[in-house]
Image (cartoon, helix red, strand yellow):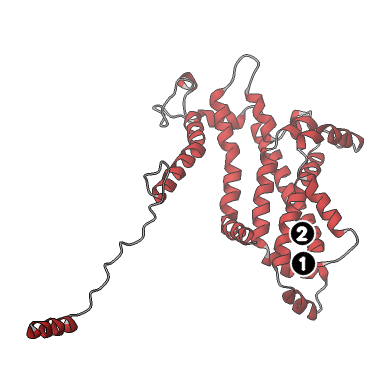
Amino acid sequence: MSRFDGTATLSTEMAPPKKPPKKPPATAAGPGLFGARRRNKSRLVIAIILSVTSLGPLLYMLSLSFQPNGGLLGATVLIPTHPTVQNYVQAWTENSFSHYFLNSLIVAFATVVITVVFASLAAFAFARYQFPLKQTIFYFFLASLAVPNLLLLIPQFLLMDRLHLLDSLTGLVLLYVASNLPFTIFLLRGFFEAIPKEYEESFRLDGARTLRVLWGLIVPLALPAIAVVSMFIFSASWDEFPVALTMINSSQNYTLPVGLADFIGVHTVAWGPFFAASVIATVPVIVVFLISLRWFRSGVSLGAIR
């Protein structure tokens, strides 16, 4: 009995300790969409749904722009059976579409340049200087963001009439600049405040004045933010319709959104050229986005961090 006990004790002492059972690797098996799928699969499904919802109408419009006019309204497939570019030729050459396109380019680029210049000056003042009623003026700019632009149509019309700027691209640019300034100042001020003041102080030690500090130091460092606001301003100015329709009377000064209405007649609608013109109208916005994409990602990420 004692030998059995000793052997048992010895074997027990010599046996290696048992390792705890391995736990299965953690997976992202959350509740999912309906309580059964994994979380990553749910995200994939949501991403696909959002992509189809966003790109579906655009792809369908692109498909219809290549359809012949005879079978356009009955088309139910994305790939045209008899594609044609005649709609694009007709859209560009008729109804002064190319002239409207040029007007929109002038208005959009002028709005971007003027807004960015004046917003940078104002944002730099709000970020670096102390002056009376600083916060009150800044909050006044923010309060203007809560006012819908449609409520300002009549006051803007009367103001442009007294300034003799009705039916002119100059008046349209001034109205677009005024509507985009508050948001641009708000965004740029945050980025300017994030730039360390030590950079500015070392820059001033070399004899740089305020404007040189702004354009030579602050603006290059805040280029991602400027790219983001420039893209938003261009898109808003390019697609704007109610103000342009109200302020512009002559077809010579029509912008592209107003000019697209010429494809819609009283009794008939030139659907093929209309869809082709709509596709052409989306190209500049896509091009501007692709150009600013390099700075757009870093600008959005920095804004999220703040």
Residue 54 % position (x, y)? 51, 39
Q: Quadrant of the N terminus?
A: bottom left
Q: Which mark is residue 214?
A: 1
Residue 82's image quarter?
top left
Q: Which mark is residue 296?
A: none
Front residue of 303/20: it is 20
The kind of residue tagged 1 is: Leu
| Looking at the image, residue 237 lies above or below residue 117 | above
Residue 96 % position (x, y)? 67, 30
Q: Which mark is residue 120?
A: 2
Front residue of 105/140: it is 140
Q: Residues within 10 Å of mark 1 (few under 14, many from 20)?
A: some
Residue 277's image quarter?
top right
Residue 137's image quarter?
bottom right
Disc 2 from disc 1: Cα separation: 8 Å
Front residue of 68/227: it is 227
Residue 59 % position (x, y)? 48, 35
At a point 81% along the width and 78% down the height, the residue shown is 207
The kind of residue tagged 2 is: Ser
